[in-house]
Amino acid sequence: MMNERKTEALVRDKLRALGYNEPDNGITVEEQKSEIAKVKALLSKASKNAKGNAGYPEFIISNRKDTAFLIVFECKPDVKKHESTTRDKPIEYAVDGVLHYARHLAKHYTVLAVAVSGTTASAMKVSNFLIPAGSTEAKELVNESGFPVTEIISYDDYYRLASFDPDVAKKRHSDLLAFSKELHELIWTKAKISEEDKPLLVSGTLIALMNTTFMKTFGALPAEDVQEAWLGAIKKELDKADIPQAKKDTMLQPYSSIAVHPNLGKPDSRTAKEYPDGVFKEIISRICDNVWPYINVYHDFDVVGQFYGEFLKYTAGDKKALGIVLTPRHIAELFSLIANVGPESKVLDICAGTGGFLISAMQHMLKKAVTEEERTDIKKNRLIGIENNPKMFALAASNMILRGDGKANLHQASCFDDAVIKAVKKMKPNVGMLNPPYAQSKSDAELHELYFVKQMLDCLEPGSMGIAIVPMSCALVPNPARDELLSHHTLDAVMSMPDDLFYPVGTVTCVMVWIAGQPHAKSNRKTWFGYWKNDGFVKTKNKGRIDQNGNWATTRDRWVEMYRNREVHAGESVTQMVTATDEWCAEAYMETNYTLLSKLDYEQVIKKFLMFNLMAGVADDANNAQDENEEGGAESTTPS
């Protein structure tokens, strides 16, 4: 009879060889038991014989850096008992058994389930499955090329491959949104940190946690020493950057005010009972548990920008009045696809904000890189940003630091500063991306959005592509900037974007694509106009606009294909020769596609028309009655 202990020994040796048992790596390997309370509760009735007793897989692996992720192993000595055709015989088969346990654990955890059979290394058979938290569906684990993983791999490799599963990513995003609201409440009610400093507190904490010493020791520090240690850890991480000292000082300055904030020090009478070690330590602990796991693995995720956007939702007043209109993440992604960025691109954003465009571009560029030399070159030389606001600059710089590099070419200055622009032009950028500050009044003539667009295009190499998302008024209302732009650059395309794209801010926008250094008249070509009003996102009460039905990827790919091929479809796109005095939007030239109209569309329009007439009639009757009353009143006061 085959011995299952031999299979377990093979797995144990493999885990040891892959570094799972290395000291101080944060990984815990438990065998046929667990000391994790939640795991014990979930497996308390998970026996494979369905008698309601506790049951445990052979190995349960957890890690401090992400306590919501588990790896579990089930072993069988006979490779013939690796997997049943129905996967419903957990006592007899390795795959059936590990999926049985994983589904119990997936009620709370994202689970990587590993089935192993065989008693020798050469005969050993391995299957890997992923069950996202909250799901019961097991997916075969695949690598970046889509091929199944059929061996036991390192923890970091398991974690990386599991991280990019669409369902796991969706759950991750949802969890981060929920936590951002929770963190906002804690920071606002207990620490009284200002709106603009909240995202700095998050980004600074993430940088501080990069410092191994701080991460290991902050929990043991007295409350009054945490702020000083926090700022010291940030400084140490900034000192590692290969950039001028003046830029390091500029980056550090916004964090200094948080390091002396009175409400983050020793607990006062309001918070001492609830947080005896101080509210700052509580904030750091929560960020460490709930946000830090994203940093080392989820490089496609703009964590700092996400928190900035989420915190902004809770800011009192009109965000547009502040000139703050943050670019949605999927639009930053769309820009990179329109520009078709790659390892040869040099991307410029002269109003970098939190760095969303640069991070999206970097991710797309890295995907196309082949060698490590190309990857290093992308991070070090091919991302260029300018941001005038010191605090926003610190956020952008921290965003890049958390991704390993890219901060060397960030400039804290006005994008109209001649010295900075001269330095930028020397780098010869060939792709521009821009979401300019939106003019806060008609008197801001010199700060019109199109002058920012022109400044970006003037920095690019001739023939390069510059993309900007601007208010629709820029495409409709006459302005001297339109003449200046067309005198030096070509308007290649304009896409009308969803009306509620920036919800809850009510700014209607369009995307303009320009070819730099080629006067529009000399190009003698038609501009392509796209009617991109439906991106598939829906407004929700607590999460804002989200891709609830998963349609964005299909919509995005169709939009990009239409633009690249300059396709013309009734109701979707059109080409038109335009000048500075014309309207630059699809609605002005596009033919209606009547085949898309349904009976319901007609009925709704007729109902609206009838309702309009009805209300207009009511208003007329009311006005007539008021006129009669006024006339009657006048007559009654006339002397006889």
Image (spheres, rainbow, N blue to C red):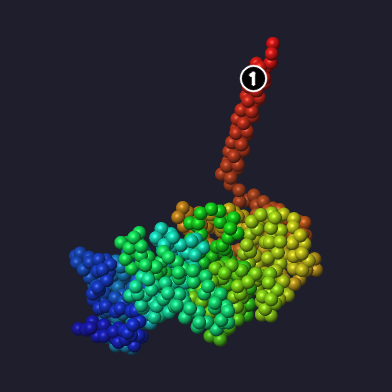
Residue drawn where x is 57% and y is 42% of the image: 604
Residue 570 sits in quarter: bottom right
Foreground residue, 450 or 559?
450
- Measured from the top left, where is residue 135 in percent x and y? 36, 64
Q: At which x and y percent is residue 476?
A: 71, 55
Q: How many marks?
A: 1
Q: Residue furthest right?
A: 522
| Label 1 element class | helix
Q: Residue furthest top?
A: 640
Can residue 97 be seen by looking at this rendering? yes
**Is the residue 23 above or below the residue 286 in the image?**
below
**Image point (78%, 66%), residue name:** 487
Name the foreground residue: 190 vs 588: 190
Which residue is disc 1 drawn over? 633
The quadrant of the image that shows the N terminus is bottom left
State the image quarter where residue 155 is shown: bottom left
Give how far across and how far down residue 377 sits, in percent: 58, 83
Q: Is residue 144 visible?
A: no
* Residue at image coords 58%, 82%: 244
